Image (cartoon, rainbow, N blue to C red):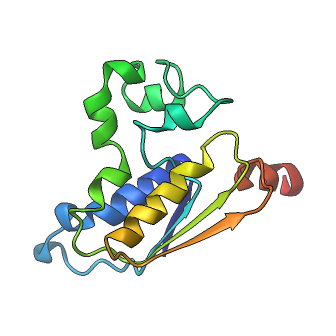
């Protein structure tokens, strides 16, 4: 299993959906049996419409930094290319994906995971989705606060 949270979840989903493009038979067998995404952004084009509390569009936002320090509106094609949701249809061999997301997350909108899950299901991919009820914060924030 391979897993990631927030931006790491984004990276995990990109890996899950583009593995067949990145590796060939000469690379040998990949030993990853599945992927776990904790609240990763999945569609950088729709994220701005889904969030009222987090800046996702300016050059200094997390999305802007991913786009090379440019505002989202200046790099729409790159934002699409960097969005896991846009690889679902063409991905042929996708290992199982588990998605977990708090329904009150104020950083990465819950709708990001829900819409990704629904599209994965629509294309017959092996995916499970668990929504944390009334969870406002990223789990990593909760762990750091309570564990140290």
Query: Residue 112, image x and y in percent?
Result: 52, 50
Find the residue positioned furthest to the left: 26
Which residue is at the front of the view, 25 or 55? 55
Which residue is at the front of the view, 47 or 39? 47
Find the residue positioned furthest to the right: 146
Whether residue 12 sits left or right of residue 3 in the image: it is left
**Residue 133, quarter of the rendered image:** bottom right
Which residue is at the front of the view, 84 or 143? 84
Up/down of 86 relative to 44, above or below:
below
Q: Residue at x 45, y 49 (%)?
A: 42
Query: Residue 115, image x and y in percent?
Result: 48, 56
**Residue 87, quarter of the rendered image:** bottom left
Up/down of 94 relative to 71, above or below:
below
Q: Residue at x 52, y 33 (%)?
A: 49
Query: Residue 56, image x and y in percent?
Result: 53, 28
Whether residue 86 sits left or right of residue 126 in the image: it is left
Q: How many discs mark residues in the rendered view?
A: 0
Up/down of 128 relative to 141, above or below:
below
Q: Residue at x 60, y 44 (%)?
A: 109
Whether residue 31 sits left or right of residue 118 in the image: it is left
Which residue is at the front of the view, 56 or 70? 56
Q: Residue at x 31, y 63 (%)?
A: 17
Up/down of 23 relative to 53, above or below:
below
């Amino acid at each position: 299993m391979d897993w990631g949270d927030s931006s790491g979840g984004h990276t995990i989903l990109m890996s899950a959906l583009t593995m067949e493009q990145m590796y060939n038979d000469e690379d040998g067998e990949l030993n990853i049996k599945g992927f776990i995404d904790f609240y990763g952004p999945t569609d950088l084009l729709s994220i701005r419409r889904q969030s009222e509390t987090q800046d996702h569009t300016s050059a200094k936002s997390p999305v802007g930094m991913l786009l090379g320090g440019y505002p989202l509106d200046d790099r729409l094609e790159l934002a699409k290319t960097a969005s896991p949701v846009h690889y679902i249809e063409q991905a042929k061999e996708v290992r199982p994906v588990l998605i977990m997301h708090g329904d009150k997350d104020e950083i990465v909108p819950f709708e990001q995971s829900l819409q990704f899950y629904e599209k994965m299901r629509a294309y017959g991919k092996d995916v499970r989705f668990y929504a944390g009820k009334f969870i406002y914060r990223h789990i990593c924030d909760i762990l750091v606060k309570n564990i140290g």
